[in-house]
Amino acid sequence: MEKRNTFSGKLGFVLAAAGSAVGLGNLWRFPYLAAKYGGGIFLLIYILLAVTFGTVLMITEIAIGRKTQLSPLAAFKSLSPRWGFVGKLATFVPVLIFPYYCLIGGWVTKYTASMIFDSQAAASDTFFSDYVSGTGEPLIWFGVFLAVTTLVVIFGVNKGIEKLSRILMPLLLVITVVLSVYVVTRPGSKEGVKYYLMPNFSQLSFKTFLAALGQLFYSMSLAMGIMITYGSYFSKEENIGKSARQIEIFDTVIAFLAGLMIIPAVFEFSGGDKEALSTGPSLMFVTLPKVFASMPGGKYIGALFFFLVLFAALTSSVSILEAIVAGFIDTFKSRRSATTLAVAVYGLILGAVCSFGFGIWSNVKILGFDILDFLDFLSNSVFLPLVGMLTCVVVGFVIKPDSIIEEMELNGPFKMKTYYKVMVKWIAPVFIFAILISGILQSFGILKI
């Protein structure tokens, strides 16, 4: 068995974990959800949930990882053999997500190149649909993105993941700030900024709350096994609470700036039509290229934006692959390079199947879903909330909150003990269960959110 690596210090851990959290969920999903659910009121609810639910769930997962020094596949079994199946479920989530996340990463790579070399073509009405329905080209860009992800993980925690994060995360923050400042200082952006920043309490609803809480899982990489895995590489000398707060701040700032960048820009482009923002995947791949094409210097702004998205997608795909690889290494004592390559081959095969689902296999449906949409439904609507809820149950009622508090207090007093116990035992699992049920009902069209 290879010696277990660790991050070189607190900064390396925080940047790597923040890199995992900052991904497509921040730069694409957060802005269109904010637009759909009232802008400022969604932003306010999300921030409140981030500092309550987000804090509790993140410190729980990091503490489990550091306490056991294992990835989820083995960590839950070591905590309670009867509840070891939770670790299997937690590992199954990144196994489902990895192939199609890398496929979407390939789309982003293609758009980055297109914005540099032919931005006007990327802004055409049929560019995206023509591209994804192709057979060969999507696989080439997917392969490039997958290869880079695989190479980083093969290099390991210090030379691969941490080094990548130390370079890309500060760069990502700088690009986000530059683009946000550019957008909000443009004439015509005022109404979009006002809509995004000013809470309208008449638009507050339970659906807004559920949407914001659901986004929390995507945005902070919770219930995917990632934070447990990264926690297992975290030094016992460092303070979990402070590190978790820094990760949350970084992640929330990027999500906030993404909204500040995208919502006013699309508002101006669409003449104030917020429906233009609520278009799901087409927001990034259809609407935004048109927005950039309409801007002075839009070619360069668009290229910079897709570089930003590419960096975020890469740091997240690396963390997803690492969560899978670490699980196999801990369980089967396999070598990192061989394990990573084997998982990459699996990702290549299933990712190609997902890609064909938009083209030559577009007539293949599973419960009414396209292939990629079905995997997304299973991972995001079923297994993410299920794993989050079961993690709270294991901590709250099986190993007891005191076991996590004990790990937290290795580096000083944990001042929110009572709050933590109430949240992890009673409040968090109930609301996560609500996300689980609503997500399933929404996916089948029974509930409209």
Image (cartoon, helix red, strand yellow):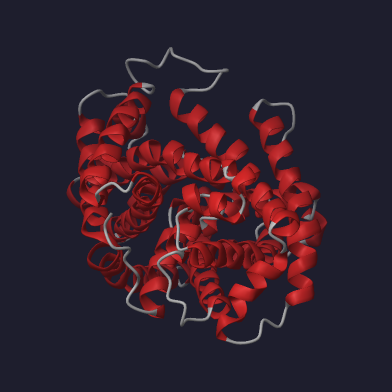
Q: Is residue 160 left or right of residue 252?
A: left
Q: Residue at x 66, y 66 (%)?
A: 56
Where the C terminus falls, by quadrant?
top right
Please tell me which residue lies in front, 27 or 369.
369
Q: Where is residue 228 in the image (x, y as percent from the top left)?
A: 50, 59
Q: Where is residue 351 in the image (x, y as percent from the top left)?
A: 33, 31
Where the N terminus falls, by quadrant?
bottom left
Please tell me which residue lies in front, 199 or 406.
406
Residue 53 visible from this viewpoint: yes
Q: Position of residue 204 (x, y in %)?
A: 79, 55
**Furthest residue to the bottom?**
412
Please tell me which residue lies in front, 350 or 126.
350
Residue 197 visible from this viewpoint: no
Q: Where is residue 109 in the image (x, y as percent from the top left)?
A: 26, 46
Up/down of 417 relative to 21, above or below = below
Q: Is residue 449 left or right of residue 272?
A: right
